[in-house]
Image (cartoon, helix red, strand yellow):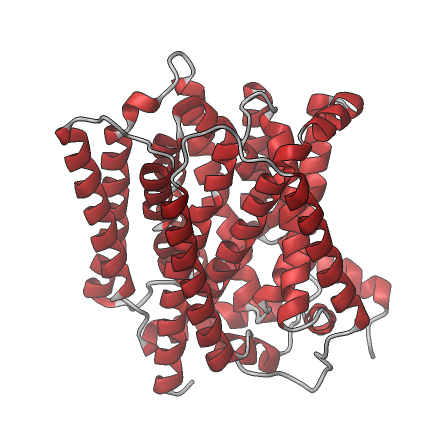
Amino acid sequence: MALSKADGSRNLFHAIATDIHFWIPFAVLVGGLVLLDKLR
Amino acid sequence: MPATRLRSLQALGIFCGFAAGAWLGGAEAPIKLVNPDISPITVSLIMVFGVFLARWSVPALIRGTSHVRNDVRQAPHLIVWAVLAGCMWAVANTLTIYAIRNVGLSIAFPLWNTNSLLGIFWGFLLFNELHYAGWKRWLGVLGGAVCMFSGATLLAIASAHQAAPGKAAWGIFAALGAGILWGTMYIPYRKAYLTGMNPLSFITFFTVGELATMTVLAVAYRGATPLWHELMGAKSVMFWLMLGGFVWVLGDLFQQYATKYVGISRGIPLSNTNQLWGLLWGILVFHELRGGSQAVYMQVAGGSLLMALGALAIALSSATAREHSSWQDAADREGQRYGVEGEYVRAGMEGRAYGTGSTRRTILDWLLILATTSLFAVLAAMARLPLMDIALGWAAALTVAMLALLAVCGIAIWRTTRFR
């Protein structure tokens, strides 16, 4: 049976949220924003 | 994939890496033309406007935006990855402006170019790059990257007298921060291309992240009204900054194709030859290092030679069929995690067509191209060249060299993959 659009989105976000590859760049981005705040 | 096809794609990726170096290096030149009284945040915001226009109009010109819809249907998760990468790019780009202001282009460049070492690390750790590559290729890639880093450091020492006293530490932090952000930004890049996405699709979502981040940063840091006044006061330099953004996008597009076909461990170091191009612009056009001692010129020559040798070593260390099969393992893992069709992933990796979806240009594409061209024409009419000692002859010669690379590399991508 085909997944509904909502189920598809939920699965997609679950796959991203449980992917370590997402959290590495995300953490670096937060670090960059902190550094930028110190520099301004 | 047939061995001949693999060799063609590897050669194409390496060529794209060198073309990326030329265009990314050239993009830094217009920043030099800008009055230092304008806030770096505002400078970055204006550049990103140019980047945004380029990232939509260039794909519209090359293939039409209908192929973007086809890609998103296959791999919708890549929108999130592209936006995340765009946010990282915007923060890194702003940091580079602080770095250039505080320690000068010649020092800032090698520091943020450490991103290639980080790129090799992430490529190996997360995407099976350099697996089963053999010691010769390891030596070529890692040795080449270290060689390039040493050359970059030598260039930095040669131009150390350009640093602004008292601000050097923050400039160095800013440049290193940009390097870490850019080095890590290649994770989403590789993620996208292992899953089969077209670089021309990826950059259209990427730029949503960069424009949104830059706008939020600019309004939060400057305040809406002062920012508006500063933008209005920057009319005469807006063209140069947006042109810098446009040039950067062309370099980045070549970098994306290099990443797609030779991976981040090779594509990123090759595109970091942008430092040599930045140096050429600095010395020949803006007369940097003028009046330097013979030792300084020797350091510049030695550093440039080391960088060129490092790039050559990487260029000669393309992936073997066995290494490429381990990339395919990583691609299968991505496909399974995000439910992407296997044939779409394989077609993307091999640079061939997938499905029969329409990729014709629409009226929207032509409107995008027309609007961007008109805006640049209006800004060019308002632009003024600042009172600086600029060697226009050298600027023209370097521009011609960049355009020649653009044409030759563009034709090579078209012939080999039809811009896939």
Q: Is residue B383 left or right of residue B369?
A: left
Which residue occupies 38% across, 79% down? B8
- Relative vertical location of residue A20 with respect to residue B35 in this rendering, above or below: below
Residue A32: x and y in percent read: 55, 32
Residue A15 visible in the current orientation:
no
Q: Quadrant of the C terminus of chain B?
A: bottom right
Q: Is residue B335 left or right of residue B109?
A: right
Which residue occupies 17% across, 42% down? B302
Residue A20: x and y in percent read: 56, 50
Q: Nearer the viewer, residue B21 or B124?
A: B21
Residue B238: x and y in percent read: 64, 37
- Relative vertical location of residue B277 with respect to residue B12 in this rendering, above or below: above
Q: Is residue B235 left or right of residue B276?
A: right
Numbered disc total: 0
Residue B147: x and y in percent read: 22, 47
- Relative vertical location of residue B225 with respect to residue B4 in this rendering, above or below: above
Q: Quadrant of the N terminus of chain B?
A: bottom left
Residue lying farthest top? Answer: B166
| Residue B348, quarter of the rendered image | bottom right
- Relative vertical location of residue B260 with respect to residue B360 in this rendering, above or below: above
| Residue B88, quarter of the rendered image | top right
Which residue occupies 37% across, 57% down? B265
Q: Is residue B309 left or right of residue A34?
A: left
Residue B153 visible in the current orientation:
yes
